[in-house]
Amino acid sequence: MKMKKMLLTVAAVVFSGLVATACQPGNPDTSSANISATVFSGVLTTIAGQNGHGTAGIDEQRLYRNIAELSAKKQGLAKTVLTDVINHSGSVIRGGLKIADYRPTKSLTKAQRDALSRVNREIKSIRIIESLTTKTGKRVKNGALHNGDKYVVTVKNTYSQGAFKEAAQHVVVSRLTR
């Protein structure tokens, strides 16, 4: 039964085109399939334009929110606390949460404040790398995409206590108009 479940998990990762490397491979909460599904869950990949003049992009706001939620879970921070901070900040941004002027509705414990600080450090350590290549591996500029080109979004986490090290989403460009 475990072997069957493992094969289905591996098949799901390969099928979806998501790849991730977890910090703690033995921990079921940080398996490659779970990390990939969490980091890129609900993140819209937009491909638009005409063949030869196509563009690609992702919803970074949603990506950062997913990373914050994953980090909060690893740090033991309740989702309600994180949601309260995000709602107060207005968003999760590349530079981190706006926690300096955050006034919680309830007093936070020292453990919650420390966990929130670690979540913020992790968000600040994230690098998003977008790569566009042709079928043969040659680099392409955004705005010059053709059907069949590859768009890869790699999320690198340099925070030592992070929830994951790296995750990537691979998309083959299609449906550009002629």
Image (cartoon, rainbow, N blue to C red):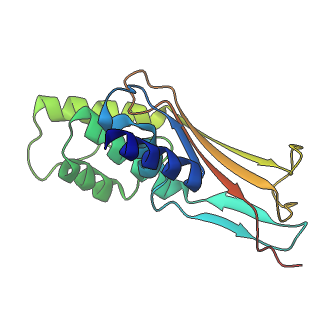
Please tell me which residue is depicted at 34% across the width and 53% down the height of the picture: 89
Q: How many marks?
A: 0
Quadrant in the picture for the N terminus: top left
Residue 168 to residue 178: above or below: above
Q: Residue 148, image x and y in percent?
A: 82, 61
Please tell me which residue is depicted at 22% across the width and 50% down the height of the picture: 79
Q: Residue 43, image x and y in percent?
A: 51, 60
Instruction: Report the side of 142 relative to 77 (left or right).
Output: right
Instruction: Report the side of 71 relative to 43 (left or right).
Output: left
Where, by quadrant of the figure, is residue 90 drawn? bottom left
Residue with the most extreme bottom position: 178
Instruction: Report the side of 1 relative to 81 (left or right).
Output: right
Please tell me which residue is depicted at 56% across the width and 42% down the height of the picture: 19
Quadrant in the picture for the C terminus: bottom right
Q: Residue 70, image x and y in percent?
A: 35, 43
Residue with the most extreme top position: 160
Residue 57 to residue 25: above or below: below
Query: Along the line of sight, which residue is nearer the eye, 157 or 4?
Result: 4
Query: Along the line of sight, which residue is nearer the eye, 162 or 4?
Result: 4
Q: Residue 124, image x and y in percent?
A: 47, 35
Residue 97 at least partly seen: no
Please tell me which residue is depicted at 32% across the width and 54% down the height of the picture: 86
Residue 130 at least partly seen: yes
